[in-house]
Amino acid sequence: DRYELAMRAWAVQDASVDRVVKKVYAKRKRFVRSCFERIGFRGDDAEIRTRLMLCYLSWEPNMYTEESQGKRRGLLDRQNAFLTRMND
């Protein structure tokens, strides 16, 4: 979300915030990975997709503010289709 960068910067300076940020990130990672696992991805395939999705969700709101919501939504839909496509 749009507060991700600020929270991570704060966590570098404050050990109690760091613990909370790490705990929240671990929960997010488990959830996102479980979504990929439910559709059949395992091992490194699930891990790579999890990392890409978490990076996108963390950075996208801060990086692409000049694009319309519709454009961003369309790209997210394409990204999701790409990440959920099984390799042949």
Image (spheres, grey):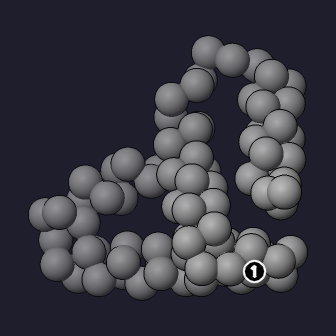
77 versus 28 height, above or below: above
Instruction: Examine the image and state in which quarter residue 18 appears.
Output: bottom left
Residue drawn at point x = 42 percent, y = 84 percent: 23
| Pick the front one: 66 or 52 | 52
Furthest residue in direction front, as rendered: 88
Q: How many numbered marks does the figure carry?
A: 1
Can the viewer see residue 4? yes
Can the viewer see residue 28? no
Residue drawn at point x = 50 percent, y = 43 percent: 59
Residue at mark 1: 37
Disc 1 marks a residue whose amino acid type is Glu
Position of 72 compared to 44: left or right?
A: right
Q: Position of residue 37 (x, y in %)?
A: 75, 80
Q: Could you tell me which quadrant the C terminus lies in?
A: bottom right
Instruction: Examine the image and state in which quarter residue 20 appears.
Output: bottom left
61 versus 14 height, above or below: above
Furthest residue in direction left, as rendered: 13
Residue drawn at point x = 31 percent, y = 58 percent: 8
Position of 64 compared to 18: left or right?
A: right
